[in-house]
Image (tube, grey):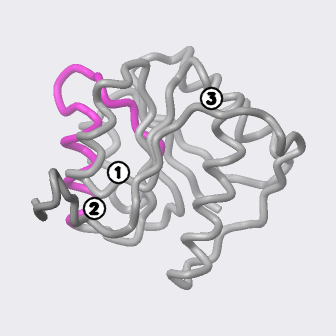
């Protein structure tokens, strides 16, 4: 499966790459240092199963890149990765599949993989079966529901 990792921090890209490679699957992973760089390679992005995007980047940030990618490739799974939990609600706007905190990747990535796999099966997109070797771990994450209707004090927004 093809995966894109976009983060302006080379160190953070490397951490995510290492965690993905530790899964033991033959992923093709490309790294990008900016939203502009990622968007310029849309030929590859269209072939990806998952795009991991940092939100807080100079120039085209992760939310802007995610919006453009979803407009052109609605079936690509976008996983927003950031150090700031206050961006979680912005993920709804770009129809992100998941939101992960950078300081919790080791714990949250396995659950993210399982959720994306389930979404892929329902949506007829093929993703590999990934195993969570420690299913009893506690995880901190925000999961975005498939339905985009939200309620506030009983009224639909």
Q: Say if 42 sits above or below 85 in the image.
A: below
**The disc label shown at residue 41, or none:** 1
Give the residues drawn in magenta, as a range: 52-71
The image's mark for residue 105 is 3
Name the N-terminal-most of marks 2 and 1: 1
Instruction: Look at 32% across and 69% down and name the residue there.
Output: 147
Query: Where 77 sits versus 135, above or below?
Result: below
Which sits earlier in the primary sequence, circle 1 or circle 3?
A: 1
Q: Where is residue 144 in the image (x, y as percent from the top left)?
A: 40, 53
Q: Residue furthest bottom?
A: 124
Q: In this view, does 67 lie to the left or right of 33?
A: left
Give the crowd class for mark 1: few <14, some 14-19, many >=20 residues within 10 Å. few
The quadrant of the picture occupied by the C terminus is bottom left
Q: Quadrant of the N terminus?
A: bottom right
Determine whether the residue tagged by mark 2 lies in a helix, strand or loop.
Answer: helix
Q: Position of residue 61 (x, y in %)?
A: 23, 31
Which one is in front, 136 or 10? 136
Cα–Cα gap, marks 3 and 2: 23 Å
Across and down, in percent, residue 5 comes to 50, 39
Say which of marks 2 and 1 sits in front: 2
Occupied quadrant, residue 105: top right
Q: In percent of the image, x 70 and y 31: which residue is there?
A: 107
Q: Which residue is drawn at 39% across and 27% down?
A: 33
How far separated are the C-alphas under marks 2 and 1?
A: 14 Å
């Amino acid at each position: 499966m093809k995966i894109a990792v976009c983060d302006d921090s080379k160190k953070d890209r490397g951490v995510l790459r290492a965690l993905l490679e530790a899964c033991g699957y033959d992923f093709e992973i490309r790294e990008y240092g900016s939203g502009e760089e990622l968007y310029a390679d849309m030929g590859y992005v269209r072939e990806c199963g998952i795009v991991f995007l940092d939100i807080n980047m100079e120039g085209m940030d992760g939310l802007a890149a995610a919006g453009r990618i979803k407009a052109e490739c609605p079936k690509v799974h976008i996983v927003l990765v950031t150090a700031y939990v206050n961006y979680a609600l912005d993920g709804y706007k770009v129809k992100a599949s998941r939101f992960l905190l950078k300081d919790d990747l080791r714990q949250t990535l396995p659950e993210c993989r399982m959720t994306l796999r389930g979404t892929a099966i329902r949506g007829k997109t093929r993703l590999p079966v990934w195993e969570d070797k420690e299913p009893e771990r506690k995880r901190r994450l925000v999961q975005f529901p498939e339905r985009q209707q939200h309620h506030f004090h009983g009224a639909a927004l």
